[in-house]
Image (spheres, helix red, strand yellow):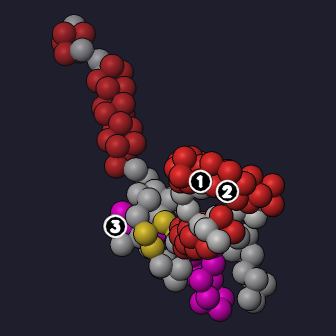
Amino acid sequence: MDIHSRTRDVLGQIMATLLVAIFTLPGLLVYWLLRPRETLAERYERDLTEEAILQDLEQQRVCPQCRRRIEPDFVLCPTCRHELRAECAACGRLLQLTWDVCPYCGTERTPQEEPEQPEAAVAEAVAAVDWELDSAPDESEAED
C-alpha cells in the first residue's frame, strides 16, 4: 500500500512488490532505499503551497524606485516619495502615470513638468559664474 501512495507508475508498483516478495528482507531494505521520499499527497500539497506563494508575490506591488511594498491606492511612495499615480484634473480619479487620457472622463492628461534637480541647478549656476569671470575684463586692462 505504501507504493500506491508514492507513485502512479504501474510498472514501478509491480516491480517494488515483486522485489519485496522475491527477496523478502533484503528486498524490503532495497525498496526502503529506492522508494520516493514523499507521497503523492505530500507532493500535491507542496505544489499548491508553492503556487499560492508565487501568486501572492505577483500580486504585491512595489515602488519602482526603492522597491518597497506599496498599497494599490497610494499616490506617492511613503518611503522615497516617488510619484506612483496622478490625479485627473477633471474628475479627480487616480491615473497611472503612463496614461495619456483619463479612462473615466476622457480628459487628456497634460504631463506635469519635472521639478529641476538641485544638482543641475548648482551646476548651471557654477557654469554661469565661470562664464562671467572668463568674459569680464581684467582690472589691469581696465586701468590702461
Residue 20 lies, with reference to residue 100, above or below; the image says above
| Label 1: element kind | helix
Q: Residues within 10 Å of mark 3 (few under 14, many from 20)?
A: few
- The residue to which callout 1 is attached is 24
Residue 71's spot in the image, x, y percent?
47, 79
Magenta residues? 80-97
Judge from the rendering whether residue 93 lies leftward or rightward of residue 121; answer left or right. right
- The residue to which callout 2 is attached is 21
Residue 62's spot in the image, x, y percent?
49, 66
- Image label count: 3
Looking at the rendering, which quadrant does residue 89 occupy?
A: bottom right
Front-lying residue, 142 or 21: 21
| Label 3: element kind | loop
Residue at image coords 76%, 64%: 8
Mark 2 vs mark 3, foreground winner is 2
Front-lying residue, 92 or 141: 92
Judge from the rendering whether residue 69 lies leftward or rightward of residue 14; answer left or right. left
Rendered image: mark on residue 79: 3
Q: Quadrant of the C terminus?
A: top left
Residue 130 lies, with reference to residue 140, above or below; the image says below
User: The residue under label 3 is which amino acid type?
Assistant: Thr
